[in-house]
Amino acid sequence: MLAARSICLTLSTCREKRSSNASTEHPSQRAIEDLLVAQPDPQFDENLRKLRTLSREVVEAAKTRYEVDAIIAPGDSRLCAIVAAAGYACRALPLGYADRNGRAFGMHVVTGVLGEEAILRIMRAWEDPFPEGRKAPPLMVTTETSTL
């Protein structure tokens, strides 16, 4: 079995290699040059901290208000974005696939700080009533296997 070989380069190394090996400038050369001189937003860390704090407050307030240990929402809701910003775990609970286009659909669950064990319990309980969610997507099922 052949293993893929990967070489990690810094942006500076990429710039040097492109400059020394190319007779013409590569289309992405300008983007690399811009990244090397770009300065990070000095407010980024502070804004991230504020976003994370606000997101945690929203999740915890909802859990407290409704006296629940977990929040379950539609899979296409904004729940995962809020939870990711809060730094909490969010997991998918599959329901099945749409007849019209085969697109997967389901719910998402979040529990908050140190709630991974509860998420796993909920996911396990979810499997029995919704077995369709565990099947392979319709487009991955070949004609031969679908007739069995």
Image: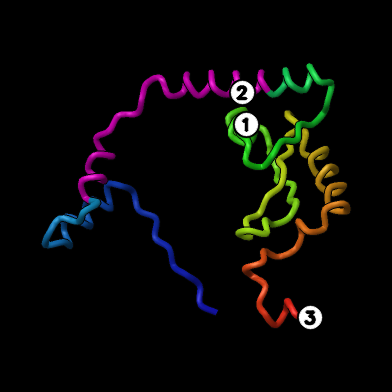
Residue 114 seen by the camera? no
Task: Reply above or below: 72 against 5.
Answer: above
Name the residue that disc number 2 marks.
Answer: 55
Disc with the residue nearer the chain's start (2 vs 1): 2
Say which quadrant the C terminus sits in. bottom right
- Give the CA separation, mark 1 to mark 3: 44 Å
Task: Reply above or below: 15 against 51.
Answer: below
Name the residue that disc number 1 marks.
Answer: 87
Magenta-colored stretch includes residue 99: no
**Which residue range is magenta in the image?**
29-58
Residue plotted at (60% across, 18% down): 54
Residue plotted at (58% across, 30% down): 85
Q: Nearer the viewer, mark 2 or mark 1?
A: 2
Q: Secondary structure at mark 1?
A: loop
Label 3 is placed on what type of residue?
A: Leu
Magenta-colored stretch includes residue 53: yes
Name the residue that disc number 3 marks.
Answer: 148
The residue lying toward the viewer, choosing from 12 and 123, is 123
- Give the CA separation, mark 3 to mark 2: 48 Å
Residue extending furthest toward the front: 100
